[in-house]
Amino acid sequence: MQGASVLVWLLGFSLALTTVLAKQGPWVMRISCGARVNVRTAPTNTLWYKDFAYTGGIPANVTQAPSYISPPLKTLRYFPLSEGPNNCYNIRRVPKGHYAVRLFFGLDANPNLQDEPLFDISIEGTQFYSLKSGWTNHDDQVFTEARVFLEDGIASICFHSTGHGDPAILSIEILQVDDRAYYFGPGWGQGTMLRTATRLSCGNGKPKFDVDYSGDHWGGDRFWSPITTFGQGSDQPRSTESGIKHPTNAPNFYPEALYETAIVSTDVQPDLEYQMDVDPNRNYSIWLHFAEIDATVTGVGQRVFDILINGDVLFPEVDIIKLSGGRYTALVLNTTVMVNGRTLMITLHPKEGHHAIINAIEIFEVVVAESKTLVQEVRALQTLKSALGLPLRFGWNGDPCVPQQHPWTGADCHFDRNGSRWFIDGLGLDNQGLSGFLPNGISALQHLQSINLSGNSIHGVIPSSIGQITSLEVLLQNQIHAVRPEIEPSSGRLALVSCLGLDCHSNVCKKDLSYNLFNGSIPDSLGQLTSLKRLNLNGNSLSGQVPAALGGRLLHGASFNFTDNAGLCGIPGLRTCGPHLSAGAKVGIAFGACVIFLLLVVCSMCWWKRRQNILRAQQIIARGAPYAKARTQLSHDIQMSRHYNGHARTAAENGPSLLS
Ligand SMILES: *[C@@H]1O[C@H](CO)[C@@H](O)[C@H](O)[C@H]1NC(C)=O
Ligand SMILES: *[C@@H]1O[C@H](CO)[C@@H](O)[C@H](O)[C@H]1NC(C)=O
Ligand SMILES: *[C@@H]1O[C@H](CO)[C@@H](O)[C@H](O)[C@H]1NC(C)=O
Ligand SMILES: *[C@@H]1O[C@H](CO)[C@@H](O)[C@H](O)[C@H]1NC(C)=O
Ligand SMILES: *[C@@H]1O[C@H](CO)[C@@H](O)[C@H](O)[C@H]1NC(C)=O
Ligand SMILES: *[C@@H]1O[C@H](CO)[C@@H](O)[C@H](O)[C@H]1NC(C)=O
Ligand SMILES: *[C@@H]1O[C@H](CO)[C@@H](O)[C@H](O)[C@H]1NC(C)=O
């Protein structure tokens, strides 16, 4: 009893402890891609989990890290095109919340793959970054980072091939941040994500992460690029040893050390100007950090400057001491601007006789999150993927319709403005060498208008659930018309390969009767599809009656093709349907017919013999032969027995019977 209560107490205690811990620390997941065991890296003893949750790809060793800010990991995972154009990490059981997601890229140690790959990256179906050529030479381009809301328990991070080398990923970090982190006003929230375009720590000579600055874990371990001059040659770094007031407040938890360095302008060029290249026609959220750390500025009114973005004054007459409430006190200003051109310029323009100062700059691109595909349709496609045995090259990973630049091969997507959801309105999987079957679950693709499975080797029955896809207009499943034998290079065995289009040389092609094709009957439910305009089921192994409703539709101009199906019947152009007989019944009927035939033969032989005997007996009586008496005696006996049976006949009529 006591043991049990101790156990309960321990359980309660550990539960309480985990709750407390959960409250204290943010949720953190770090993956060392390609690693076979968990890894810890110096100097912070950071834990990286061994590789998991990927959809494909190949682990490999890293060539010398492209930059010294990359975590010191030895492996990566790369995704050759043969594994499909879209590959993902689907990390499950991520608590609902707000996260900083960061990915470092790597270079494969294989000397044949040295070129830097360029590819696209999406989170939760939203494409937010494309690697730019030359990224290996820039510290701040060896990774990408975004602040995202993860709502459904899964973080789906995908890499999309653009034909410039194999995507290669060194590490993935998913770090929980405050729910209100980087709130910038209306427009912020679940419909958007913030991609970090740059993050600068001014007046500081070394790249730093929050962790190097002993920052709060809720800050998301930001990376700060060092900058000591804005390039005019007239500005100067400044730093202080004094402590800074109020830097680490929620929701952003900036490290105190960030405010201990700054860049100030001088008399030669009083303006401070920072310029960066950006993608045009996007919205950028800009966060500027200040603290008055210059010993010569001691009170309100001694340093006043305007802040201009691309020439527009967005913050007039900024006085740090006035706004922050004192010297050595942190001040954060944020604004969101739309940038039409390719440059974003931040100018600090001081009042006559003053100098400008700035401690840090953060620039985020505001990325509008994509709507995703209806969950039940994604599931149905995944069922279909395994039922049809879709090869990897299809790249059916991530979301089928988004990012819009990288939809799944063969899935036609349509956006439902009303529901803000994507759905699938067509499947074009013709001539893909598929050989699986159609699963019942296909009916969950409720918006399908067309299914084209021509030229494959899909076999089995047509699932009757297709009759529930009420929008279906076109269903095409034609057999492969020919196959050609080919030696498999790997096994040396002879395999039958479908001849498609011009590949087919008539001398080596032959019709394959055994392999492909739908069999069974056409489900009655297809008759309920009132929108159906085209149904090509020619060249399958279907049998039984074509649903009457389909036959009726023929008259209304719909186009159906049921030819080359030995067993179909019941509509004009096909044979009429007889009663349905099993093989056993057919054997029974044949046997019965034989027995009846034999009986008929025997009976007619009897009749003929008897007739002969009668004729012979009549001849003997007419001649009055010496043996006639004995014969008459015999025939008398027979007659007696017949008489006994109640058939009174004359001796002349009967004569000697066949018993004689
Ligand atoms: C990676 O390096 C380790 C030794 O450091 C070696 O054992 C392993 O075979 C390498 N893997 C590949 C794919 O080259
Ligand atoms: C950013 O600015 C907006 C208004 O421009 C303000 O509402 C918001 O509180 C600011 N965010 C933070 C975290 O200071
Ligand atoms: C930028 O923001 C404005 C105002 O919030 C919005 O109307 C516009 O569509 C946004 N542009 C982009 C490219 O997101
Ligand atoms: C959109 O949905 C509403 C109900 O949610 C419905 O009343 C409306 O007709 C729909 N509009 C369209 C164009 O489908
Ligand atoms: C279906 O695929 C065949 C063969 O590739 C093609 O000829 C036909 O146009 C396709 N039909 C539809 C409706 O997409
Ligand atoms: C259809 O063919 C499969 C083999 O491909 C067979 O197992 C199944 O019994 C067949 N079904 C019917 C209804 O003929
Ligand atoms: C039906 O399919 C066969 C081939 O299986 C083809 O020869 C015929 O022309 C088709 N009929 C129609 C009406 O398309």
Image (cartoon, rainbow, N blue to C red):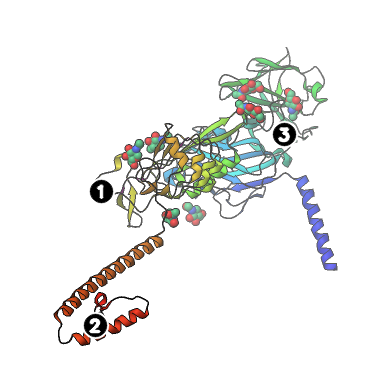
| Gap between marks 3 and 1 measured at Cα | 67 Å
Q: Which mark is residue 71?
A: none
Quadrant assignment for ligand 2: top right
Mark 3 secondary-structure assignment: loop
Say whether residue 448 is left or right of residue 648.
right
Q: Earlier in the sequence, mark 1 or mark 2?
A: 1
Q: Between 394 and 63, which is closer to the camera in this rendering?
A: 394
Q: Is residue 566 magenta?
A: no
Q: Residue at x 34, y 49 (%)?
A: 497
**Mark 3 Cβ inside 8 Å of ligand 2:** yes
Q: Earlier in the sequence, mark 3 or mark 1?
A: 3
Q: Nearer the viewer, mark 3 or mark 1?
A: 1
**Corner quadrant of residue 264:** top right
Amino acid type for the residue under numbered disc 2: Ser
Residue assigned mark 1: 508
- Report crowding for label 2: few under 14, some 14 to 19, many 20 or more residues within 10 A (C-alpha): few
- Report crowding for label 3: few under 14, some 14 to 19, many 20 or more residues within 10 A (C-alpha): many
Residue assigned mark 2: 660
Residue assigned mark 3: 181
Q: Residue at x 33, y 57 (%)?
A: 493
Does the magenta stretch mainly form a helix, a strand or a loop? loop
Q: Nearer the viewer, mark 2 or mark 3?
A: 2
| Gap between marks 2 and 3 measured at Cα | 121 Å
Q: Is residue 590 above or below residue 50?
A: below
Circles 3 and 1, Cβ within 8 Å, touching? The answer is: no
Residue 247: percent from left, percent from top: 77, 33
**Corner quadrant of residue 358:** top right
Q: Between 275 and 36, which is closer to the camera in this rendering?
A: 36
Amino acid type for the residue under numbered disc 3: Ala
**Mark 2 Cβ inside 8 Å of ligand 6:** no
- Report crowding for label 1: few under 14, some 14 to 19, many 20 or more residues within 10 A (C-alpha): few
Image: magenta residue range: 471-483
